Image: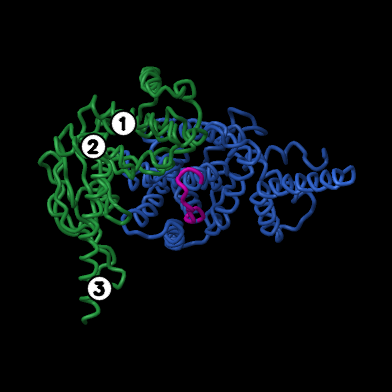
Amino acid sequence: MESLLSLPVIISALELGFIYALVALALFLSYSILNIADLSTDGCFTLGCAVGAQVAIMGHPILALFAAMAAGVCSGYIMAFLQTKLGVESILAGIIVNTGLYTVNLAVMGFSSNLSLFKCDTVYSLCKDWFGSTWYKLIVSIVIVVVACVIIAWFLGTRIGLSIRATGDNPDMVRASSINPGFTITVGLCISGSLTALSGCLIGQYQKTCDINLGTGMVTIALASLIIGETLIGKSSVFRRILGVIVGSCLYRFAIAIALRLHIPAECLKLVSAVIVAIAIASPYLKKQIAFQKKRLAAASARKGGSRTC
Amino acid sequence: MLKLTNIRKVFNEGTVNEKVALDGVSLTVEDGDFATIIGSNGAGKSTLFNCICGSFYVDEGSVYLDEKEITYMPEYRRAVEIGRLFQDPMKGTAPHMTIEENLALAYLRVAKSRNSVFSRIGNKDREKFREKLSLLNMGLEDRMKQPVGLLSGGQRQALTLLMATLIPPKVLLLDEHTAALDPGTADKVIALTKRIVEENHLACLMITHNMHSALELGNRTLMMDAGKIILDISGEERAGLTVDGLLEKFSVGTGKALDNDRILFSKIEGK
């Protein structure tokens, strides 16, 4: 195990895990809480990266975080607008926004398919002197993600947060208790979009590069992290669920890191991801099935034993 | 005061499945009025409630609340003044949220100032919730941190009633809200309903299939059939009426409706 996971591998897995946890947190809001399958995540992630990269290149790496979040809010708002004002199904709205964002992202990147951040400062390079060269990336990521998580946890306890939760939990009740579901969905998706874009921005600054295909498959990865977290940590309280999101995201990164250490070629990584995602999503169901089969076999053998004695 | 004038609602208009759900209903319910509504399935009772709440908009006619026209006001805005309970106890509460979180949502009706949108549940709120919950006599005041999904149907319905009346609305609509409960719990919820309506002087409409409670509860009884109100009794006439008398009136009423159906059929055949 030691040869499999050296300290640098563990650290880089944690760094990525924390950064990608923001996307999982975004999906926690849209998918788990609002019950909306937000397929615009892929495009929104790249949008955050592109906007963040451009602003960082201009020399404002910290402003880049907020610019990316603002871009994410716009993306989330369009998604919500399509759903609540134009009556487009949530899955279709996501696909439409995602498709449109591809062109938008290219435009933001100046119609080139990648941008390099090697020559400019990033939030990471700014903090390098303070925390030492081994830990600085991890510390910056943890700080940003923990702040985001605390804000979301606090927000979900406010009246507006409660009404967003109720919107996904029982739409009938929400309408009957004077909450406008269109409004809560819009707020929820805007926040979710800003988190996704923030994550994209951090990844861009972390890898010092932005690629137009960066976000491809992001929604599956985030979903996997979310479900790994829910399976392991449970979903009894908002705090536990948010903790689960981070744990799930880190575990997913560890799985990928181990796959890489086992010399699985990089071309096969997407397949490995897909298998991990499938296992993660299927595991709660399989757990139940196995428990049921055990019970059934035990009951069958008990009946046999009983009939012999009779 | 709730006033409906000449409400008409048709489903699937212009198709073979056309159904006139409400056919020129006019009704005025004063503050403090507690009217029970009876009628066979498909008489238009729930449709009437949906029109009052704004679940869908009416085809013709107007809805007024205290002289203010609300015919085209969206459902969530009407909900500030109109409380509603459904037959299904699962419909009125959010199952994955705790009891106190559900109650806090009910307070949103009066959250007028901008700041309160970001306010959280404080100890003052908790005390108030605890006090209100203890009135239910179900021990819910000690389970405020538990998700509502763990409660029984009766407990959830009682909680919904409390939520709908925590900030007293002007109108309370009860759609067979005790039909899915066991007799004991149903009695408890009915008693609670009675007390809340009397204390807050609400205008209340209650759909019921129970002839006894249709006559015992409230001060007015309405009978609906085929999208029309065919009987509206109150005062002495109602006080003297027995269940048998009511049933007789019911069959007289539906008898008329049957004739109408025949006329309708003969018209179609004639074509």
Name the amino acid, label 3: Phe
Closer to the camera in the image, B261 or B77: B261
The quadrant of the rendering that contains the N terminus of chain B is: top left
Q: Quadrant of residue A226?
A: top right
Please tell me which residue is depicted at 50% across the width and 50% down the height of the picture.
Answer: A49
Secondary-structure class at tag 1: helix
Q: Looking at this view, is A33 or B135 the one in front?
A: B135
From the top left corner, tell me how far across and down residue A163 is, in percent: 38, 38
Q: Which class describes the residues within 10 Å of circle 2: few (<14), some (14-19), or many (20+)?
A: many
Tell me the colour chain B is drawn in.
green
Who is closer to the viewer here, A275 or B38?
A: B38
* Residue under the point 41% across and 38% down: B93
Residue on which the image places disc 2: B204
Say if B14 sits above or below B239 in the image.
below
Dot 2 falls on which chain? B
Q: In which quadrant of the rendered image does the C terminus of chain B lie? A: bottom left
Q: Give amino acid for label 2.
A: Cys
Q: Is residue B269 above or below residue A16?
A: below
Looking at the image, do the residues carrying marks 1 and 2 touch, with CB atoms under 8 Å apart? yes
- Does label 2 lie on the same chain as label 3? yes
Q: Which residue is mark 1?
A: B193
- Residue A8 in the magenta stretch? The answer is no
Q: Which residues are magenta?
A: A32-42
Mark 2 residue element: strand
Residue designated by label 3: B265
Q: Chain of mark 3?
A: B
Query: Is label 3 or label 1 in front?
Result: 3
Residue at the image point whose x is 54% and y is 31% from the top: A239
For marks 3 and 1, give the CA distance.
43 Å
